[in-house]
Image: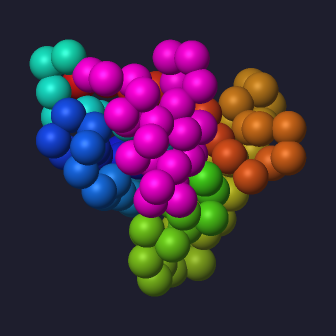
Amino acid sequence: MLVYMPDGGRGTPQLRTAEDLGALSVRVDASSLDWDILSKTLRAAGAGEVVGAHAWLDISWLRAAAGKREQDWHRGFTAMLDYAAAHGWLSDDGRRVRAHIGT
């Protein structure tokens, strides 16, 4: 899954490649990014926030942004979250998942 952030992290977050459940990342359209702006934009959209060098994405937002999907996708999404949990990439409350940020 890829969350695309246009305009240097100022634009509305867009979920792209929702069918790719083998990876999760945030891609910022910028040669240099402003971590504060990126975090504010994610928070304003209800998509998550930046903590350190990673985005913590709201799982409910990811599900909603993916739109209507077949049951196989939901099983794959749950498997992705299980994998993330096994590696310590879920928040303590289980509501967010950690993602890499790139440009």
Q: Is residue 52 above or below residue 101?
A: above
Q: Is residue 46 above or below residue 52?
A: below
Front residue of 56/11: it is 11
Q: Which residues are magenta?
A: 33-57
Q: Position of residue 54 (x, y in %)?
A: 52, 24
Q: Position of residue 83 (x, y in %)?
A: 70, 37
Front residue of 82/95: it is 95
Q: Is residue 65 visible?
A: yes
Inspect the magenta stretch and tell me whether residue 35 lies in it: yes
- Image point (42%, 28%), residue name: 36
The mark total stands at 0
- Image point (79%, 31%), residue name: 86
Inspect the magenta stretch and tell me whether residue 38 lies in it: yes
- Image point (50%, 17%), residue name: 53
Furthest-right residue in this view: 92
Side of 83 where 98 appears, left or right: left
Q: Is residue 51 above or below residue 39?
A: above
Front residue of 14/34: it is 34
Side of 49 where 68 appears, left or right: left
Q: Is residue 17 visible?
A: no
| Quadrant hosting residue 8 | top left
Front residue of 80/53: it is 53
Q: Position of residue 73 (x, y in %)?
A: 53, 67
Q: Quadrant of the C terminus?
A: top left
- Image point (51%, 49%), residue name: 43
| Quadrant hosting residue 32 | top left
